[in-house]
Image (spheres, grey):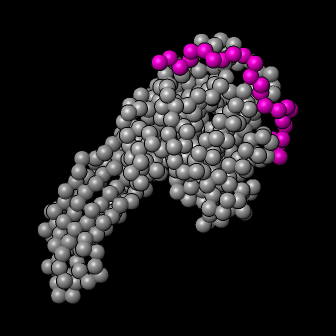
Amino acid sequence: MKRLKEELIKISAMGRASNCSVNYYAQLDPKMGVTRPEGSSANKALRDFTVERMQAAGLLVRVDCVGNIIGRKDGSSKHDKAIMIGSHLDSVMNGGHLDGALGVFAGIEVLRRMGDEGFHHQRPIEVVAFTGEEGSAFVVGAMLGSAVLSGKMSPDEALSIRNMGGQTLDEVLTDMGYKGDCTYCVDHVDAFLELHIEQGPILDNEDIPVGIVEHITGITWLKSIITGFGNHAGTTPMHLRQDALVAAAAAIRFLNRRAHEMAKSVNSSVVGTTGHLNVYPNNINVIPGMVELGFDIRAASLESMQMLTTEAVTYLNGLGHENGIDVQVASPDVQGPVKLSEDIIGTIEASAVQAGVKFRRMASGAVHDAQNMASVARTGMIFVPSVKGVSHSPMEWTEVPWEELETDKSGPLSQTEDISGDFWPP
Ligand SMILES: [Zn+2]
């Protein structure tokens, strides 16, 4: 684990505003986060470092046509389907260094550890670093690399997406030297595992080091436009107003109250947020004539998510009957929850019991590459605690009990077998 610790410290400086590495929590600076969108020099530096570490661990490294990096170690049965482990290397603007990268480097460490302990695996094991999970450079497409690898998006579609500077993903990858020439054939993957920071407060609050993800929660975005009548704030008596913001405020409170109640009584994963609000004309001395409102509703169960969405739509439509307010509710944009493999959940649970590590089952409230991979392979996720539940922030941190883990026996694996076979069919 010393190797992994050194790697994580090294990558903590890549893309950090201070250029300094971070060894422990107290060194974090709320103004000095990590910025590694696809195409940045920090993203290229981390990609280069990842390839170097994969090769040093004896993996055969390939890059596919959308820049996914895949390192492979064959097992005794070379033609079996692979176990794939990994996550992403890109970050949000001013985020933390472990979001994504921890899962990639943990995958490399798994293979090194197997080598140290003389464990001979039968299946091929592949470590993957997906392109563009965060959508921080190519805002219209999050989880791009895993979307292509899992067949949800065509390579051409992904490569033609433009970043805010007008460059296509194709151009950005070519500039970084990470535009591979092959398409990965996902039929070769039997199972996918992703280790990731929790990005929420549950594990840290309960002092539990391992979360086993059962579901990645579904997301519904519900947009509406509330129209009243903009008028003078001083001359319009209270009983003659059509105030769109007052109506919106009632809807915001309704969503918050019902999400609280449903989380207590229906499904603990239910959350409801008003994250988007545009007020027109947004002048201090004018009664708001129009409000655009955006609700984000999530739950691990589709029924619960639908229930809260239906209630919110009914409430919004009901506002139209009061005080001459008009409400237009767009049809909800729904991404259903994803259930992860019970087989893999059981295996992780049994391993945690065997290792004497405390764990709990939980839902993931954030989306991850595992969500795409779950449609093509048995998929599991392990969460590790985020200190104070903070993520996408310079203060993002996970404590690792390194001292208890200093049990390395030898250096990295060496690759002895020829693995230049045809595992990537055209
Ligand atoms: Zn992530």
**How far across and down, in percent of the image, does residue 328 sit?**
19, 56
Q: Nearer the viewer, residue 231 or 149?
A: 149
Relative placement, left or right, of 186 versus 232 is right
Magenta part, dominant SS: loop
Relative placement, left or right, of 32 versus 244 is right
At 51% from the left edge and 47% from the top edge, which residue is drawn?
38
Image height check: is 234 above or below 125? below
Relative placement, left or right, of 57 versus 229 is right
Question: Which corner quadrant of the image does residue 128 belong to?
Answer: top right
**How far across and down, in percent of the image, does residue 239 sit?**
16, 80
Span shown in magenta: 403-426
At 71% from the left edge and 47% from the top edge, which residue is drawn?
8
**How far across and down, in percent of the image, does residue 276 sit?**
35, 61
Image height check: is 394 above or below 123? below
Image height check: is 2 above or below 313? above
Magenta run includes residue 58: no
Q: Nearer the viewer, residue 263 or 352?
A: 352
- Image quadrant holding the N terminus, namely top right
